[in-house]
C-alpha cells in the first residue's frame, strides 16, 4: 500500500504556471478510490475545544484513527491539504479526522493564546493528536524586506533574529506576535515528535547569508530538531506547480517525505516573486498558499506514515512506533 511517491498526475514535472481548477479536478479521475473511511466534518471551522472532543470520541471508537491538525491553514480551497489528505486516507484505508485551522477565520485558533496552545498540548499528552503541520507567519522574516521600495527589515541574522533593537511600537507588536506564534508552534511540533507523532514545519528556505534572518538558523529551532531527530529538506515550489521558484524549507520527522522533495531542475520559466503586479498587488501574496501538487505530496507522506504506523502495531503510546528519545541527531537532507 505504501511505496515511493508517484503522483497520479504529472505534478512532479516542471511546469510554468499553477494548475487550473479543472486540471486539479482531473487528477481525481486518475485513481479509483474505495469507499471513504474518513470522518465527516463540518465545513465551518470549529473551535479547538470542539476539535478535542471530536478527537476524543473518534479515538474511543477506533484506537487507530488518525487525528491531524493543519495549523495556519488559510482559507479552504480546491487541492488544499485537507482535500488531498482525505483523498490519500481513502486510498490507504485510514480513518481520519483533520482540522484546517486559522485564526484569521476563527480567533479561537490563535496559537499565541495560552488557552489554545494548552488544549493542543493536552491533546498531545492524551494521545489525541497524531500529526501536525503548518507554517507560522513569516512576513516579519521575509528576505523581501531587504529589497528597495518595501518595508524595512525587522530582523537580522544571528543575535537579532528575534527582532532588531530599534523597532517602532507597531513593528515591536508585529514581531512579538510573530515570535510567540513561531515559538509555540515549534514547541507543539517538539512535544508531538517526542511522543511518537509526526510533524511538518514549513518556512522559507534559509539563504545562509548575512544579514538575512531565518528561524532555521536559530538555536530554538536547531535544538528542537536535535531532540526529535528531525530532517530538514529544501524544495523549490516551481517543481510543484508554483508560479515562482520560491525556495522552501520543510522540517519534519518522516523519512518518506524526503523521497518527494524536489529542487529546481531548470528548463521552465519562473514568475516574479517580488515587486507589484499590474493591479498594484505584491507578487509575494500569491505565494502564500501551497500549490495543489505540494499539498498532495505532503498529504501522501502523512497518510503513508499513518498507514505504516497502523500496520506496525501497538506500542506504549497507544499505537504506532515508540516515542522519539531526546538527543538523537538531526539531518539536513537535499541540501546544496
Image: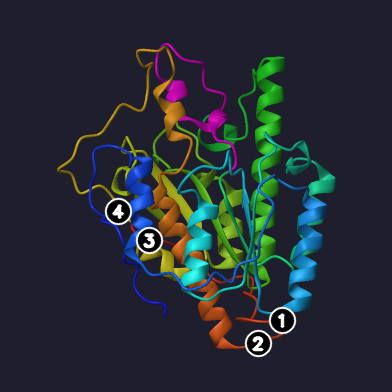
Does 138 appear in magenta? yes
The x and y percentages for residue 288 are 48, 35
How far apart are the two marked residues, 3 and 2, measured between alpha carbons?
A: 30 Å
Query: Which quarter of the rendering shows the N terminus?
Result: bottom left
How busy is the neighbourhood of tag 2: few (under 14 within 10 Å), some, or many (20 plus)? some
Q: Considering only vertical position in the picture, is 168 above or below 336?
A: above
Q: Earlier in the sequence, mark 3 or mark 2?
A: 2
Q: Give the range drawn in magenta.
A: 136-155
Q: Residue drawn at (44%, 49%), measured in percent from left and top?
A: 249
- Disc 3 secondary structure class: loop
Give the label on residue 314, or none: 2
Give the label on residue 333, or none: 3
Give the label on residue 11, or none: 4
- Disc 1 secondary structure class: loop
Q: In this view, does 80 lie to the left or right of 66?
A: left
Q: Which of marks 3 and 4 is nearer the N terminus?
A: 4
Q: Nearer the viewer, residue 309 or 247?
A: 309
Residue furthest to the right: 115
How busy is the neighbourhood of tag 3: few (under 14 within 10 Å), some, or many (20 plus)? few
How far apart are the two marked residues, 3 and 4, measured between alpha carbons?
A: 22 Å
Secondary structure predominantly adopted by residues drawn in magenta: loop
Amino acid at each position: 500500500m505504501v511505496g515511493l511517491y508517484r503522483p497520479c498526475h504529472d505534478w512532479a514535472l516542471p511546469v510554468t504556471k499553477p494548475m487550473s481548477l479543472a486540471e486539479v479536478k482531473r487528477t481525481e479521475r486518475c485513481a479509483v478510490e474505495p469507499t471513504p473511511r474518513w470522518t465527516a466534518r463540518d465545513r465551518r471551522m470549529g473551535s479547538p475545544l470542539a476539535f478535542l472532543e471530536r478527537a476524543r470520541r473518534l479515538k474511543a471508537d477506533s484506537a487507530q484513527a488518525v487525528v491531524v491538525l493543519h495549523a495556519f491553514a488559510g482559507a479552504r480551497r480546491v487541492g488544499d491539504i485537507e482535500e488531498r489528505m482525505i483523498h490519500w486516507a481513502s486510498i490507504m484505508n485510514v480513518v481520519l479526522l483533520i482540522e484546517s485551522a486559522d485564526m484569521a477565520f476563527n480567533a479561537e485558533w490563535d496559537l499565541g493564546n495560552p488557552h489554545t496552545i494548552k488544549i493542543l498540548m493536552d491533546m498531545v499528552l492524551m494521545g489525541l493528536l497524531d500529526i501536525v503541520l503548518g507554517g507560522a507567519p513569516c512576513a516579519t522574516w521575509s528576505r523581501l524586506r531587504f529589497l528597495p521600495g518595501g518595508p524595512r527589515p525587522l530582523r537580522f541574522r544571528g543575535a537579532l533574529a528575534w527582532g532588531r533593537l530599534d523597532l517602532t511600537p507597531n513593528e515591536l507588536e508585529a514581531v512579538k506576535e510573530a515570535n510567540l506564534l513561531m515559538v509555540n508552534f515549534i514547541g507543539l511540533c517538539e512535544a508531538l515528535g517526542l511522543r511518537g507523532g509526526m510533524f511538518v514545519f514549513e518556512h522559507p528556505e534559509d539563504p545562509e547569508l548575512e544579514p538575512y534572518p531565518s528561524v532555521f538558523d536559530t538555536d530554538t529551532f536547531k535544538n528542537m530538531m536535535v531532540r526529535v531527530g528531525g530532517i530538514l529538506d529544501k524544495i523549490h515550489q516551481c517543481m510543484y506547480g508554483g508560479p515562482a521558484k520560491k525556495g522552501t524549507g520543510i522540517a519534519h520527522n518522516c523519512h518518506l517525505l524526503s523521497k518527494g522533495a524536489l529542487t529546481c531542475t531548470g528548463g521552465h520559466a519562473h514568475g516574479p516573486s517580488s515587486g507589484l503586479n499590474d493591479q498594484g498587488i505584491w507578487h509575494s501574496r500569491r505565494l502564500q498558499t501551497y500549490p495543489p501538487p505540494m499539498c498532495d505530496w505532503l498529504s501522501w507522506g502523512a497518510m503513508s506514515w499513518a498507514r505504516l504506523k497502523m500496520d506496525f502495531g501497538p506500542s506504549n503510546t497507544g499505537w504506532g512506533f515508540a516515542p522519539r528519545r531526546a538527543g538523537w541527531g538531526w539531518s539536513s537532507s537535499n541540501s546544496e
